[in-house]
Image (cartoon, rainbow, N blue to C red):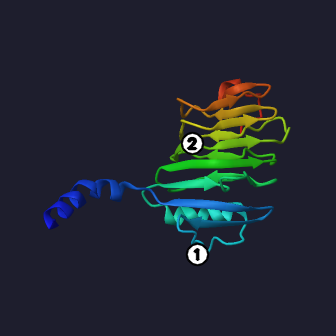
Amino acid sequence: MRTLKSLLLILLWPLLVMAQPKFIISGNGNSFTAKDESETVIDGAENKPIQDVIEVIRGECEGGCEIQFGNSQEALDIGNYSIKFENNWGEITLTGDITSNSSEPTISINNGISVISKANIKKTNTYYSNCAISNGGKIIISEGNIEAKEYGAICNHYTDLTINGGNIKAGIWGAVINDADMPSGEKN
């Protein structure tokens, strides 16, 4: 029996080591909280502005992580705020639902950041020049809905964009807008 347990541990160890930690963000207005899968509040990520919570998660996300927006019943509404993924992260997997009414993109992915999106990401503001996602890094859309009320769903800045699933709902400029297609002065 001991040999069987040892064999199982050896076979399953790579899967255990590769599992990404998962963080769940809840809240609204200007007060958001991140918890881990066991519902434990992440130190420094309680009742904070959304970008502060994202930065605390970044400190916990060495080697990659999953970030779930909202609970399974309702979307995380970040109001007039936006989220920027910048600096050093491992691979980020986005899940859940998020919506923003900001004049900035709901999610901005900067150079050197790698994201797999399975999330529903929505931009409700009718501000002319902003997308639901601004991609300056690497993103794979594998599931979920990406939607902008007006402009385009994704602004892609000559970077690595793969869409192999999900639904991209076009704004007035189209589903994906590349830098060359954006009006002068409107690149975000």
Percent x, y for residue 127? 85, 39
Task: Please name the amino acid that badge 2 sits on.
Answer: Ser
Q: Exactly how many numbered labels are in the figure?
A: 2
Q: Could you say which quadrant of the image residue 147 lies in?
A: top right
On the question of residue 56 being in view, the answer is no
Mark 2 or mark 1, which has the lower sequence index? Answer: 1
Percent x, y for residue 76? 72, 54
- Residue sitting at x 67%, y 46%: 107
Residue at the extreme right of the image, as rendered: 126
Q: With respect to residue 18, does 129 lie above or below?
A: above
Task: Please name the amino acid that badge 1 sits on.
Answer: Asp
Q: Secondary structure at mark 1?
A: loop
**What residue is shown with label 2?**
117
Q: Quadrant of the C terminus?
A: top right
Q: Residues within 10 Å of mark 2 (few under 14, many from 20)?
A: many
**What residue is shown with label 1?**
43
- Residue sitting at x 21%, y 63%: 5
- Residue sitting at x 58%, y 75%: 43
Q: Quadrant of the N terminus?
A: bottom left
Q: Could you say which quadrant of the image residue 166 lies in?
A: top right
In the displayed structure image, the side of residue 165 where residue 167 appears, left or right: right
Residue at the extreme left of the image, as rendered: 3
- Residue sitting at x 56%, y 63%: 57
